[in-house]
Each structure stands twice: as structure tokens, then as C-alpha cells.
């Protein structure tokens, strides 16, 4: 019997990445150390990492036909990501991000151009054969539509024996009010440092205790805090922590959060404990920060 997949629903973009020796001053002209095109977007990056870790995975997101989409699709195929549920839109263009990576400290500065490309809808999601998946991860974007997607998964799970239920994770990364309703869905909820700080919290542990009341009964809330590591809080009320695992030299932090999320999901999907998954997520994300791109994280 074919192994069930992990589905990631969300964004794919073209990242145009310029690596510089130091962050440029305004109104100056300087050379890059290197420049590359790289497929980006949270859900898309998580698919890359899941594939490298050995998980069969699929991506669901929007594209518009053209050279950029061809580049993105070729790259997804290179990582053996299932493209069955990619949605081609008739309006808009593929989003593009201009990224400056400072080689001196690995920081990434992102200028994102969203070009009116519609996100996948609940109607698109109705075409998904849920029986193919053991885990579905949703990157918070068009929340009203995504709530309908999550409710469809809940209805599906209600008809399944425990061993056939789909595990669900949700990412709340951007501090936008409409996304906060997504806290109430999913077995795992990843909340970003940016969202935690938006609510006035100064650490991951403080954020988890302050936000846990928003998640559904039985869910686990997870928050990574860069070099401080990551924490998780589940229904037993026990706060679980993992230290960070920084590389000898930080060279590229772009996608580190997506790497962490994917590694935690992978570990949990393999039956590991939340403590083991948190540690594994921090280890793989740390290794990624020492590399340009993702190849070499395993």
C-alpha cells in the first residue's frame, strides 16, 4: 500500500536572492557576491524540507502560467513534490520577493511584491482526495476560505477510525487580525515570533501561556524564537523547551522558520514525542542557517 503523503497548502513565490558582504547603505551602488533565483514561500519551502527528510509530500498553492511558473514547477519536481493540486489562476502573476542576504551575519531582508494572484479557495480544496494524506499543513493566508478547508478535514476525520484520521497543523505567521481565527483549528498550531510580539509577549514561553486559550481542546501550540530555541505547550499544561543549535557560522536564515515547521511535522508524523520533534526541528533549522539554500540539511 502506498505511503500516505503530507500536504502543504499555502504560498509559492520566486525569490531573487542577492548575497552581499555587508548590508548596503541607501543610495549606493555596489556589487553582490552572488545572485540566484530560488523557489520560496512558506508552504513551498516546507515541501522542500519534507522531501529532503524523506517524506512523500504534495504542494497546493496558486500559480499563473509563464516562465516563472515553469521555473517553480521544475524545481518542485526536482524535489519529487507531488503537484497534483497546484491551481493555475487566470488572473494575476506569480509573487516575487527581492531578498538581500548579508553574508556577515546571515540576516535576510525581504521586499515582497504580491501581484494580485488569488490564493487557493475552499472550492479548489474540495477536489483534494483527503484519503491520500496522513498530515495536512495550512499556512495562514486567506483565513475565511481556509476555515472552510479545515472544517472539511474535521468532517472527514469524524467519519474515520483513529488510525485513519488526518493530523492537521496550522501556521499563524503574520500579525493580521483575520488570521487569528485559525488558532482554533488544528492539532498543532505554529505561532511566529512576530505574532507573539504583536500581542506584547517577550518570549516564546510567555507567548504560549498567553495564547494557549485560543487553541482548540487537545491541541499543541508551538513557538520558535530564533537563537533562543523553541517551546511547545500541550493540553497537559507542561511547557516543553529545546535550545537552538546554531551552526559554526550563520550564512543564510531565509526559510529557517519553514525548515523548523517542516522538521517538527516530519518528526511527529514518524511517531516521535513533542520533545523529540522540537529538538529535531531546532537541529535541522540550525543546520539550514549554516547553508545557502536547503541542499545539505540532511
Image: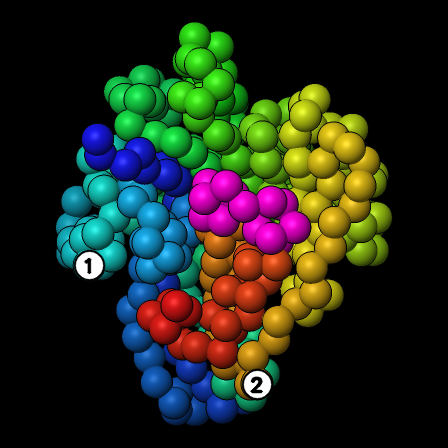
Q: Quadrant of residue 29?
A: bottom left
Residue at left 34%, top 30%? 133
Mark 1 → mark 2, Cα distance in angstroms? 29 Å
Quarter that holds the C terminus: bottom left
Q: Nearer the viewer, residue 95 or 292?
A: 292
Dominant secondary structure of the residues highlighted in magenta in the image: helix
Name which residue lies at 80% across and 50% down. 205
Of residues 38 and 167, the one nearer the viewer is 167
Query: Local crowd at mark 1 within 10 Å, few (<14), some, or many (≥20)?
Result: few
Residue 202, percent from left and from top = 83, 55
Query: As drawn, is 116 to the left or to the right of 271?
Result: left
Percent x, y for residue 66? 15, 50
Q: In the rendering, which numbered label is found on residue 78?
A: 1
Q: Is residue 276 visible to us here?
A: yes
Residue annotated with mark 2: 248
Which sits earlier in the primary sequence, circle 1 or circle 2? 1
Label 2: few (<14), some (14–19) or many (≥20) C-alpha neighbours in 10 Å = few
Which span is picked out in magenta?
A: 266-278
Which residue shows up at 41% across the image and 51% down it?
46
Residue 276 inside the magenta-drawn segment: yes
Q: Is residue 53 magenta?
A: no
In this rendering, position of residue 251 left or right of residue 95: right
Image coordinates for residue 20, horizontal then vertical, percent: 46, 86
Q: Is residue 265 left or right of residue 229?
A: left
For residue 272, above or below residue 132? below
Amino acid at each position: 500500500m502506498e505511503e500516505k503523503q503530507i500536504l502543504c497548502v499555502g504560498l509559492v513565490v520566486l525569490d531573487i536572492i542577492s548575497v552581499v558582504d555587508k548590508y548596503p547603505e541607501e543610495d549606493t551602488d555596489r556589487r553582490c557576491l552572488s545572485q540566484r533565483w530560488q523557489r520560496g514561500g512558506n508552504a513551498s519551502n516546507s515541501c522542500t524540507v519534507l522531501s529532503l527528510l524523506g517524506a512523500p509530500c504534495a504542494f497546493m498553492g496558486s500559480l499563473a502560467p509563464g516562465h516563472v511558473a515553469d521555473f517553480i514547477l521544475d524545481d518542485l519536481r526536482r524535489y519529487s513534490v507531488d503537484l497534483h493540486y497546484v491551481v493555475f489562476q487566470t488572473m494575476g502573476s506569480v509573487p516575487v520577493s527581492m531578498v538581500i542576504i548579508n553574508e556577515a551575519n546571515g540576516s535576510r531582508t525581504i521586499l515582497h511584491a504580491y501581484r494580485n494572484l488569488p490564493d487557493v479557495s475552499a472550492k479548489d480544496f474540495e477536489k483534494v482526495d483527503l484519503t491520500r494524506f496522513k498530515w495536512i499543513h495550512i499556512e495562514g493566508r486567506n483565513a475565511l476560505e481556509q476555515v472552510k478547508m479545515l472544517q472539511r478535514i474535521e468532517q472527514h476525520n469524524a467519519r474515520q477510525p483513529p488510525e485513519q484520521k488526518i493530523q492537521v497543523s496550522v501556521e499563524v505567521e503574520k500579525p493580521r487580525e483575520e488570521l487569528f481565527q485559525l488558532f482554533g483549528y488544528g492539532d498543532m498550531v505554529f505561532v511566529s515570533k512576530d505574532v507573539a510580539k504583536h500581542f506584547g509577549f517577550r518570549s516564546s514561553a510567555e507567548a504560549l501561556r498567553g495564547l494557549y486559550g485560543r487553541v482548540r481542546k487537545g491541541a499543541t501550540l508551538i513557538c520558535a524564537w530564533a537563537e533562543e530555541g523553541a517551546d511547545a505547550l500541550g493540553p497537559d499544561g507542561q511547557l516543553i523547551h529545546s535550545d537552538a543549535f546554531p551552526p559554526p557560522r550563520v550564512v543564510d536564515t531565509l526559510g529557517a522558520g519553514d525548515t523548523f515547521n517542516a522538521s517538527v511535522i516530519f518528526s511527529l508524523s514518524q511517531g516521535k514525542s513533542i520533545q523529540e520533534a522540537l529538538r529535531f526541528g531546532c537541529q535541522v533549522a540550525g543546520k539550514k542557517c549554516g547553508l545557502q539554500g536547503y541542499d545539505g540539511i540532511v
